[in-house]
Image (tube, rainbow, N blue to C red):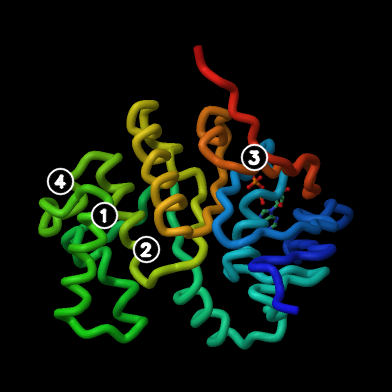
Amino acid sequence: MAGRFIEVEGLGKQYESAAPDTPPALDAVTLAIDQGEFVAVMGPSGSGKSTFMNVIGLLDAPTAGAYRLEGQDVAGLTTDEAAHVRNRVFGFVFQGFNLLKRISAAENVALPMVYAGLGGAERRRRAIELLDQVGLAKYADSQPNRLSGGQQQRVAIARALANRPRLILADEPTGNLDTATSDEIMTLFTQLNRDTGVTILLVTHENDIANYAKRLIRFKDGHVVHDGPVVHEAHA
Ligand code: ADP
């Protein structure tokens, strides 16, 4: 039987650098995520959200349990293999945009394509296509610091899409943006999820942001304390 897209079982993470007797950052986390899902991850500071995202994104290794990606146990991957999977399967979006300031928006978007081995002309063509998809084609040759925060996050989302990821991991992507801009960014994520089927896993502290997702996972003290569909209340 083919595996689920993402499946973790009894997942745990104990940081080596933590003081003795510190409870694990992740403890006995068991869940599955299917292709096309849009999941919000919530929970208080220190509850394990970032650790969970880092483990799922193959940026950090769990110390207990299993993680299967498309049926494959990722614990068996070498560092190089993990980097390859990371580049091919995941797109990352961060709170602080993390764009390179001295190169253009298009060059930022094209950067992950270098590692995927695309030629220069093809990278440029595809970067402009992606900027068009996020509504910023006319800013292709602008440097990020000429753009507003919301525009910079759109560039970062276009960059996350560069290698046609199956999963976007977004860590508080609207944390630096005002409410109206946050809503625009969340509308963009909603459209991408609906139109391209890309799976989205997004950390947020705000209920209004989580409401854009279809499923909510809530962490506390390294445990999943809630996992269920987002109930969308009808607005008057
Ligand atoms: P959240 O993202 O929900 O704020 P984290 O995953 O960052 O939570 O942290 C979970 C727990 O792990 C916290 O107790 C935190 O102090 C601890 N922690 C996080 N990163 C490290 C690290 N690199 N070394 C030691 N402890 C860490």
Residue assigned mark 1: 133
The answer to whether residue 19 shows anywhere in this view is: no
Marks 2/1 in contact by CB < 8 Å: the verdict is yes
Residue assigned mark 3: 42
Between the C-alphas of marks 4 and 2, the distance is 22 Å
Residue assigned mark 2: 161
Q: Tell me: 142 left or right of 93.
A: left
Considering every residue shown, the one lying at the far right of the view is: 21
For the residue carrying disc 3, how many other residues have a C-alpha within 10 Å: few (<14), some (14-19), or many (20+)? many
Q: Earlier in the sequence, mark 4 or mark 3?
A: 3
Q: Is residue 178 above or below residue 94?
A: above
Marks 4/3 in contact by CB < 8 Å: the verdict is no
Q: Earlier in the sequence, mark 1 or mark 3?
A: 3
Given residues 114 and 215, the one toward you in this image is 215
Quadrant position of residue 53: bottom right
Q: Is residue 129 above or below residue 145?
A: below
